[in-house]
Amino acid sequence: MNSTTSLGGAPIALPYESYVVQLLGWNIPAEHIELVHPHWRGYETPSKFWHFGFAFMYFCIMVMSCLGNGIVLWIFGTTKSLRTPSNMFVVNQALLDMLMMIEMPLFVLNSLFYQRPIGWEVGCDIYALLGSVSGIGSAINNAAIAYDRYRTIAFPLDGRLQFGHAMAFILGTWVWAMPFSLLPLLRVWGRYVPEGFLTTCSFDYLTDDEDTRVFTASIFVWSYAFPLCLIIFFYCKLFNQVRFHEKMLKDQARKMNVKSLQTNQDAEQKSVEIRIAKVAFTIFFLFLCSWTPYATVAMIGAFGNRALLTPMSTMIPALTAKIVSCIDPWIYAINHPRFRGELLRRAPWFGVKEINPSDVGSVTTDRTTTTGTTESVSA
Amino acid sequence: MFPFVLLAYVVAVKVFKKTTPNGKVTVYLGKRDFIDHLDHIDPIDGIIVVDNDYLKGRKIYGQVTTTYRYGREEDEVMGLKFSKEMILAKEQIVPPKEKSELTPIQEKLMKKLGPNAFPFTFHFPQNAPCSVTLQPGESDTGKPLGVEYCVKTFVAEGEDDRVHKRSSIALAIKKLQYAPPTRGIRLPSSLISKGFTFSQGKLNLEVTLDREIYYHGEKVGANVIITNNSRKSVRNIKVYVVQHCEVTMVNAQYSRHVAGMETREGCPITPGASFSKVFYLVPLASSNKDRYGIALDGYLKDDDVNLASSTLVADGKGPAESIGIVISYSVRVKLNCGTLGGELVTDVPFKLLHPAPGTAEREKANALKKMKSIERSRYESSRYATDDEDNIVFEDFARLRLNEPE
């Protein structure tokens, strides 16, 4: 307000002087003011167009997520041959993502009409609970998928999980999501509060006491660091196994005097190792993209320089976490050859092109009559 | 009609044939089972017949491929395939590149099939693994696991040209091993004893088999002698025939009981007592139906299923050099000494094989088989095109059950 100084000497009331700057939380009445951490009340309210912008993005994500996960649940639910133990994890992933999808209409309402959490504490709790269960659940479910794939690939003969085991693992993912979802809900440890534009809710990482800091550190390890470590561990082991199998097969081919032959078909196909590494890296990278921003925000809030946590910088991580929930079905299910086949059969309008499976079939190697050739077997 | 068919069966040479979908090219093979005699393997010899003026400058190529499938198709994830195909031999058949010596069956067929017939001969590589099929589980739908062989021919301009299905043929063949002509006189046996903590004396178990090599369908006799010098007693005796299956492609191995029995006869065998008895077990594929992972000799039709034969290794080569799926068998005897005493287990290895042609035992088995095939021919005689001139029976090659969904 110091712009009111010397303008032709006389203090003139400029038009914007009458404009009172609204700080975040202005629309929260006194009885609910507890909800909003003082940190947020230091920032101006964002323009309503920011609210509309986010509402629009969430709406798009909601539609995408509904479509992707809906198709996954529809196809898996109605195709008996696809109901293998491994695929149950994919179904679980879709369920968890659908759960996250449910919170989006709440957000859209919040942004468009209220610019605050509807339903005050209760609304906030529901919103945050959905996000927490689905977020932690899908993180650990990603790790479970990694484990299942490792078993399947490392021990193709007898490694696959039995149905009962898979179900136990799936139940485990839900149980895993519970402690850090229910404790804040019941206000036992931590609590759910609005954050950012005060239109989303999550656990409290700002309150300046030891309780909150330990809570934040624990949830960081429980729902981010631990699943991430498992994912890295299992995909690394899986990759090593694939390399080992490839080596065994090459050795055997060599014993029979069969040498790898670079046919056209072969050149188009990348080596198995590279293909596997790509898929594994995609999944790892997606997980990193989805949860690292949020984990960073929470850790900064609890232990770092809070000045960095502007309302905008906390809205973006929440958005990335949601975007991934609509990409997941594409990564897990639509990359699944048999699922794709079924989808193509049921919904040819969907535009999924199936590559002729016999062409992708197997890496062809050819026999050479020259023994003791110095030419090395191509990797 | 009936006596004639019977006659044809006794003297005729059976030939398998298959024609391309467009009907222009036909392949004839003298047999589908090729035997690995350890020092050499039967060559794959056949004849290909082409319609006049069909090729128009194109060529016919032939190849022998082996497919390793070491994981279920429905378990394939992340773009990985649990199967590998290798081309073991590849050659141009028509026009023939070089004149090779004809085998008797080729000569016979060449004479019969006229000027449009061309011979071809392929050889298995020396170390090629035997055909083995791992029995799929009840709910499995995809291709069965194992080692398969296939002869393929296709018409193309050049070796790497596009292959059309309508002018291609794929014939599934098997590579098998037979028992050596003599069974040997060595009787495998195992002697083992077990001491117990906190008590003196030992429990001795001796198991001796009545042969080293058994033929499929024969009963395996295991003479079990138990001498109990310990203070524990034996509660019961279990005897199994165990099939050991080593899948070298993924460096995995597992064992399955293919026959077994449990008895309390003579039990409890108290301290100081001894017991001796011969147990008989018959390992059969038919008693292990629908059990996932049981290894069978590669099979093409449901009526010739038998348990996989033991893998034989040529002299001077270690078993470590074997590739593919390596099969071995043992008789396993387990003595149960109660919860505290634990178990005493021993394995006695033996071999399970088909008798080599010409073996005395073979004749007996053949007589039985011939009876069966005569029986069968009563019903199937219409399927064979018999020819009384030189007694060649043509049988349509079993549709490739495994490779061609069509």
Image: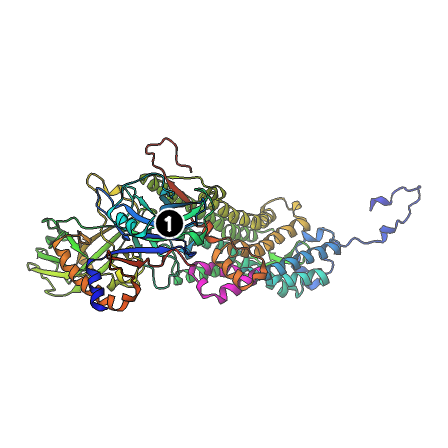
Main SS of residues in magenta: helix
- Mark 1 Cα-neighbour bin, 10 Å: few <14, some 14–19, many ≥20: some
The answer to whether B81 appears left or right of B380 in the picture is right
Q: Relative to residue B37, is residue B217 depicted above or below?
A: below
The residue under the point 63% across, 53% down is: A319
Residue A83 visible in the displayed image: yes
Q: Position of residue A104 (x, y in %)?
A: 63, 61
The residue lying furthest to the top in this view is A374
Residue shown at 12% from the left, 65% from the top: B265
Task: Determine if the magenta segment contains residue A92.
Answer: yes
Colour scheme of the rendered structure:
rainbow
Circle 1: element type? strand
What's under tag 1, amino acid-wise? Lys
Q: Quadrant of the N terminus of chain B?
A: bottom left
Is any part of residue A178 visible from this angle? no
Q: Nearer the viewer, residue A47 or A208?
A: A47
Viewer-side residue, B43 vs B194:
B43
**Residue B44 place in picture, x, y as percent:** 29, 47
Instruction: From the image, tell me which residue sits under label 1.
Output: B152
Camera-side residue of A306 and B320: B320
Closer to the camera, B129 or A92? B129
Identify the residue at horizontal 36%, vertical 37% (top origin). A368
Image quadrant containing the C terminus of chain B: bottom left
Left or right of B291 on screen, residue B332: left
Horizontal side of residue B31 vs B208, given as left or right: right
Residue B313 figure quarter: top left
Where is residue A7? Give x, y as percent.
91, 42
Q: Position of residue A305 (x, y in %)?
A: 63, 44
